Image: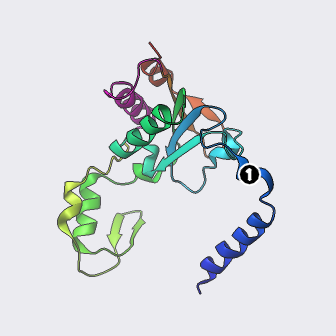
């Protein structure tokens, strides 16, 4: 058993021992909202948004981007589980700002092993086999946090399956201060009609 697996299972045993009345939590989120945010390990939506278990849906992916799958999850969150407000929260110092679609597809074409980065750029540490399928994926990289939040809020707002009466707010989490910083243009684009 790996050290990480052992640590996770031990932590789960401690958590389950004090599970208490959490088994009675309702399926719909109690506070009726959802957050789309990045998978970055430095972000803890429960802490920065004041959530307890059962409060809200949190959808995470690389960059917190409004991919088809993220929008699918938001629509399910609303249609079947009653969320009425959505947040798109990206963050400063995001790894999605460190590469482009071309860099990712080139790295994957040479090897499927983990790459490294230094002051001269990304380097593949492995040798084949690679895979050219990476060039067919839009990796949704980020050039500007403000612009990506605006794009994602607008993509959600303009999606045919998203009701016009759901407000979609746009924010950037500052990894240095812990503060949520509004992107006013994004929140305006996500205004409920």
Relative depth, front residue between 37 and 42: 37
Judge the density around disc 1: few (<14), some (14-19), many (≥20) Cα neighbours within 10 Å.
few
Q: Which residue is under mark 1?
A: 22
Left or right: 189 as drawn, with respect to 44:
left
| The stretch drawn in magenta includes residue 48 | no
Indicate the quadrant containing the C terminus: top left, top right, bottom left or bottom right.
top left
Residue nearest the observer in this picture, 144 or 172: 172
Q: What stretch is highlighted in magenta?
A: 144-165
Q: In this view, does 175 lie to the left or right of 116?
A: right
Up the image or down, 31 lies above or below 104; here it is: above
Q: Where is residue 174 in the image (x, y as percent from the top left)?
A: 60, 41
Q: How many labels does the image show?
A: 1
Quarter in which the N terminus is drawn: bottom right
Residue 5 lies, in percent from the top left, at 60, 78
Q: Which residue is drawn at 42% across and 20% down?
A: 189
Q: In the rendered image, which quarter is residue 144 located in?
A: top left
Q: Residue at x 66, y 35 (%)?
A: 30
Residue 121 higher or lower than 65, as above or below: below
Q: In the rendered view, would you say 137 is above or below 119?
A: above
Q: In this view, does 171 lie above or below 132?
A: above
Colour style of the rendered protein structure? rainbow
């Amino acid at each position: 058993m790996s050290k990480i697996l052992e640590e996770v299972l031990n932590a789960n045993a401690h958590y389950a021992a004090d599970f208490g009345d959490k088994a009675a939590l309702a399926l719909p989120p109690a506070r009726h909202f959802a957050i789309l945010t990045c998978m970055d390990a430095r972000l803890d939506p429960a802490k920065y948004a004041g959530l307890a278990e059962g409060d809200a849906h949190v959808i995470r992916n690389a960059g917190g981007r409004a991919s088809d799958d993220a929008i699918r999850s938001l629509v399910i969150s609303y249609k079947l589980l009653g969320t009425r407000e959505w947040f798109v929260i990206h963050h400063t110092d995001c790894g999605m700002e460190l590469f482009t679609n071309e860099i990712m597809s080139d790295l994957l074409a040479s090897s499927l092993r983990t790459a490294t980065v230094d002051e001269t750029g990304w380097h593949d540490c492995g040798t084949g086999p690679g895979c050219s399928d990476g060039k067919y994926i839009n990796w949704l990289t980020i050039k500007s946090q403000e612009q990506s939040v605006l794009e994602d809020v607008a993509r959600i707002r303009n999606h045919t399956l998203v009701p016009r009466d759901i407000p979609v707010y746009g924010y950037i989490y500052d990894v240095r201060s812990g503060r949520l910083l509004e992107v006013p243009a994004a929140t305006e684009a996500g205004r409920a009609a």
